[in-house]
Each structure stands twice: as structure tokens, then as C-alpha cells.
Image: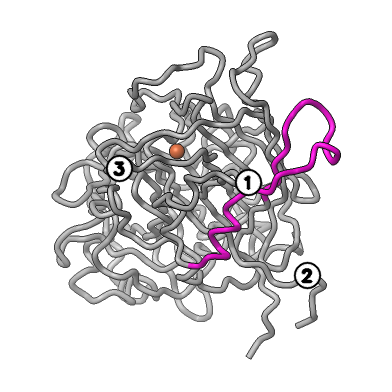
Amino acid sequence: MKAHANAPLVPTAWATIGPFFPQTFFREGDNDLTRMAPDAPQTARGTPMWLTGRVLQEGGGPCVNAVLEAWQADSEGRFRHPRDPEWRLADPGFYGWGRAWTDAAGRFAFRTIIPGGYAEAGRPRAPHINLAIIGSGIMGRLATTVFLPGFVAEHAADPVLSTLPEALRPLLIAVEDGAGPDGARRYHLDLLLRGDAAEETPFFED
Amino acid sequence: MTDLPDRFEPLDPAMQPVVPVAGYPNTVRRNPARAPFRRVLTRTELTGPLDLSGKLRPGDDNLAVLAPGRMAQGQLIHVGGRVLDEDGRPVAGAIVELWQANAGGRYFHPIDQRDAPLDPDFVGNGRTRSDGEGRYGFFTIKPGAYPVPDSGRWWRPPHIHISVLGPGSLMRLVTQMYFPGDPLNGIDRILNSVPDVAARARCIAASVLPSEIEGDWLGYRHDLVLRGRHATPPL
Ligand SMILES: [Fe+3]
């Protein structure tokens, strides 16, 4: 490793977004991972889906005005990012990132496609969507990963999901919940920020 | 493209806020009781959108002028600096979002119903993108202090909320910037929830001498350091 001219710096301290994160920052389509821009068409590749859920606080009440940021692979498990050896093959019409916010009932929704799995360091990652939650009172960000039902063997092999005690793993697996307004499959997962050990959503160190 | 980080050191807990914060019940209700699990970092964790400007459109870096001839009330200021990684290298193309209260300490937000004046010429949020040298900047007004409801006489010092999205999911930061010399800084419960004194000091902007800046804006300089490459030698 070569030496650098600048002395290392310490990352700036996080703080809460507070109660007044501007609603005007959100635009139609921000929660749609399938478009390169709000006015671009949805990608033609992959199987469309919705991820919906609620963000709940201690006691099970809604966490309103929370902001969720989602990031996931395309339908073939690729990222348009040079750290992915196949990044040049990634779906050029799939954005992979989106931002949603919770309403008065704590509800959020993302429009996306079913992510592909990928192998890294000899270990297969199951299809998954990474979520980060920021909100009033959250002094950093809460990072978690949502998995989809039906990938039993993939879940058992996933190095992130299998980090968790077995009893907690179902807390990160969404359930199928009918169809969204456009007929696409809908998956649902509630995220409990604080609660009994058996119910509190598992979060990960960043 | 070749400049993307390949290492992420864990955040140092002494440099980050500790919860709960007295008088801020949401720091209890919304923070997990269980410690976070350590996970391996694979591609999903390490990558992120390289260019967010298609989604989060920049180009709104003047909060002080709502429209031609409609200027916000308050002390006109310029807040700027650089977005850097842990090696002090500039982070180009980062999205920087900023929001704040008006000069009277009230937000243009339906949740803020405090009995303080709203300024019809101030909304108080903007979004820009760091340039090739990592520089960002906003023209705005100095925000007022405001009391936190039901908190036992806790007033937030004047502060500006800043959100930064760099080219990777881990190059994410939400922070608050404070103004030098304000007596409320020393007793603010959010600023002081960061244990390390030097880390707190880095949340306070530096005054720019009038001789160093052009125009009729009082200058503040504030650098933002994202996680990323780190010069610490390997084992
Ligand atoms: Fe504030």
C-alpha cells in the first residue's frame, strides 16, 4: 500500500435528520428503483415487484416521516459499479437505488424488480434488498437487509442472513402479499425499530 | 472510477453520537435495544449508485433567494467546503442536501407549528453536487435557535442539517453543522451526544474572514468527511 500525502481524517459525526426533513425533497418516482430517472421508462428486464411495509417504533406505533433508502442488484445479480467484475453487463435500464418515506401509518413502498443473487468469495448471496433507515431520533442510520420468500436453499447459504440466530431470520424475510396497483407481485415486511428480542428487527453494523 | 474506496474501517464509537439523548424520547423509541450484528461486506454493502443526480436532482444551491426579488430575512451567509474521504481526498459528484430553520428558528414544515414567524420568502432546503475537487456551497441565511418542545428548556443552537450521498452505500452521512462561538453549542444535547471533544469541534463551521470572500455574504467553511479509503497501513 502506498503512502498518502494527507493525514487520515476522521469521518464526520452523524446526527439525526430531526423531525423536519423536507417533504419537498421527495419527488414522484424516487421510490422506483426500476427507472434511471423519474421520466425514464421502467427496465424491461426481470420480474417487477413491490416491497411494502411499515416502520414501527417501540410499542408498535408508526414511525412517521422516516426515510428509507434501498439498494439492490439487478435481475441477474449485477451492480453497475466497478467493484462488480461484471459491471459492464449490468442492466443499463435499472437504477437499483430508491428513496421512500413513511406516511402517518408508518407505511412505505418501493417499486423494483426481483433481485438476482450473486456469488462472492465463493459464497452465494441470496436475492436481497439492502435498506437504510434514517429518522427523527435515529442518530445514525439503521441498516438491514430484506430477503424474499421461496429461496430456502439460498437463505441457508447466505453469509449475511446466516450471521443471525436462526430464530431471528424470519424477521428479515418478506411475505408475499397479493399484487400492487400495476399487478406486479407485492412483498411485505414490517420493521420494528425497538421491541422484544423476539420481534425487534435485526440491524447490521455498517 | 479508479478512485472508488476499497476499504471501510468501522466507525469509531467515540466519534459518533450516543443514545438516548435526554429530552428526546424518539432516541429511545426508535433505536434498537439489541446491538447490531456484524456482517461480511459483500457487493451490495460496498457498492452504490455512482451518479445520483438523475434521481436526486441538484441545482438548487441558493436558499436565500426564493425567486427574483424575493429575498429571505436574516443574515446572508455562504456555507461551503469540501467533501473528502478519510485520506483527505476529494469526493467528486457527491449529492449534498441541506435544510434549516428560518432566521426566527422556525421550519417551513407542516410539523413545525411553533409560535414563531414564518418567512414567506424562505423555504430552507436545497440540493447541490460536489465538483471535481469535492467542493460544495450554498447561499442561505443564518438560521435562528429554537426550543425543543417538552424537553426541559433545551434550545437547539443555530444549526444546518446536511445530508451527503457519496458513490457507495457506506459513503453516506447525515449530520448537523453549528456556528462558531454560539453559547448554546456547549449545552446542546445533540452536539454533546458525541463523546469525543475533537469530533464535536469538527461539527462547528469555521468563520471565513471577509477579506477571503467576495460578495455580500458572510462566509462559513465546513468540510465533510465520508467513510472510504483509509491510509492506515495494512497488518
Ligand atoms: Fe433542526
Q: Position of residue A114 (x, y in %)?
A: 41, 51
Circle 3 crowding by C-alpha within 10 Å: few under 14, some 14–19, many from 20: some
Q: Which residue is mark 2?
A: A6
Chain of the residue under the numbered disc 2 shown in the image: A
The residue that disc 1 covers is: A92
Residue B12 percent coordinates (x, y): 50, 72
Q: Earlier in the sequence, mark 1 or mark 2?
A: 2
Kindly indicate the quadrant of the structure image that contains residue A184. Answer: top left
Numbered mark located on residue A5 in the image = none
Q: Amino acid at mark 3?
A: Thr
Front residue (pair A80, B59): B59
Quadrant the N terminus of chain A occupies: bottom right
Q: Is residue A164 above or below residue B19?
A: below
Query: Can you say whether B194 is above or below B220 in the image?
Result: below
* Chain that bears disc 3: A
Q: Residues within 10 Å of mark 1 (few under 14, many from 20)?
A: some
Q: Between marks 2 and 3, how big is the CA–CA gap?
A: 45 Å
Write down the residue under mark 3. A52
Amino acid type assigned to the residue bearing label 2 in the image: Asn
Q: Is residue B92 left or right of residue A179?
A: right
